[in-house]
Image: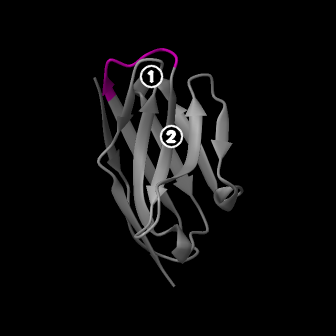
C-alpha cells in the first residue's frame, strides 16, 4: 500500500504561480513513476506531468514551458511548480504513484485560477 498526501492548491489570479506537493509513504518501490493528473468539471482526468525514479520527465503540451515537475527521493515527495497560470488550468489535481506492483492516487487538491 502506498499513501499519497497532496498540498499546495488554492485560489490564484491568472499569471501567478503555485507549487503543489505530494508526499508518498508506505511500500515505495525503488523503481517508480510519480506524477500529476488533473480533472476539470465535465472533463476526463488528464496527465499533467510525470517523473520517473531516474529523473525522466514528461509533460502534456499545454503546460510545457510553464510547469516543472521535480522530486526529492529522500523525502519520497514530488513537486509541481506551475507558473503563468491560466483559467483553463482550473481543476482538481491528483498525485499518482505507479510501480510494477501498485497504482495509487491521492485525494486531490483544488486549483482555481481566476482572471
Mark 2: few, some, or many residues within 10 Å (few <14, many ≥20)? many
Whether residue 9 is situated above or below residue 30 in the rendered picture: below
Provide residue 3's location: percent of width, then percent of height: 29, 32
Q: Counting residues from the N terminus, which is met first, the one under dot 2 or under dot 1?
A: 2
Residue 115 lies left or right of residue 84; in this view the side is left
Instruction: Name the mark nearer the viewer: 2 or 1.
Output: 2
Q: Which is more toward the observer, 72 or 36?
A: 36
Mark drawn on residue 99: none
Could you say whether the residue bearing mark 2 is in a helix, strand or loop? strand
Rendered-image quadrant of the N terminus: top left
Q: Nearer the viewer, residue 65 or 47?
A: 47
At horizontal 44% and vertical 66% (from top left) the residue drawn is 40
Residue 106 percent across, percent down from the top left: 33, 43
Q: Height in image: 7 above or below 53?
A: below
Q: Is residue 76 left or right of residue 82?
A: left
Is 30 magenta? The answer is: yes
Between 98 and 83, the residue placed more toward the observer is 98
Label 1 Cα crowd, 10 Å radius (few <14 / some 14-19 / many 20+): few
Which residue is painted at 56% across and 23% down in the image?
53
Q: Is residue 40 above or below residue 38?
A: below
Q: From the viewer's perspective, is 69 left or right of 42?
A: right
Answer yes or no: do the residues labelled 2 and 1 have beta carbons within 8 Å?
no
Which residue sits furthest top?
Answer: 30
Q: Secondary structure at mark 1?
A: helix
Q: Main secondary structure of the magenta part?
A: loop
In magenta, the rendered stretch is 25-31
According to the picture, the residue beneath numbered tag 1 turns out to be 74
In reply to whether residue 85 is colored magenta, the answer given is: no
According to the picture, the residue beneath numbered tag 2 turns out to be 35
Amino acid at each position: 500500500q502506498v499513501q499519497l498526501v497532496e498540498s499546495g492548491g488554492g485560489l490564484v489570479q491568472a499569471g501567478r504561480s503555485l507549487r503543489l506537493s505530494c508526499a508518498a509513504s508506505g511500500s515505495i518501490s525503488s523503481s517508480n513513476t510519480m506524477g500529476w493528473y488533473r480533472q476539470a468539471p465535465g472533463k476526463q482526468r488528464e496527465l499533467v506531468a510525470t517523473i520517473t525514479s531516474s529523473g525522466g520527465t514528461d509533460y502534456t503540451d499545454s503546460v510545457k514551458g510553464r510547469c516543472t515537475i521535480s522530486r526529492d527521493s529522500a523525502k519520497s515527495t514530488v513537486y509541481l511548480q506551475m507558473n503563468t497560470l491560466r483559467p483553463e488550468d482550473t481543476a482538481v489535481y491528483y498525485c499518482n504513484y505507479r510501480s510494477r506492483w501498485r497504482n495509487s492516487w491521492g485525494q486531490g487538491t483544488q486549483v482555481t485560477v481566476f482572471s
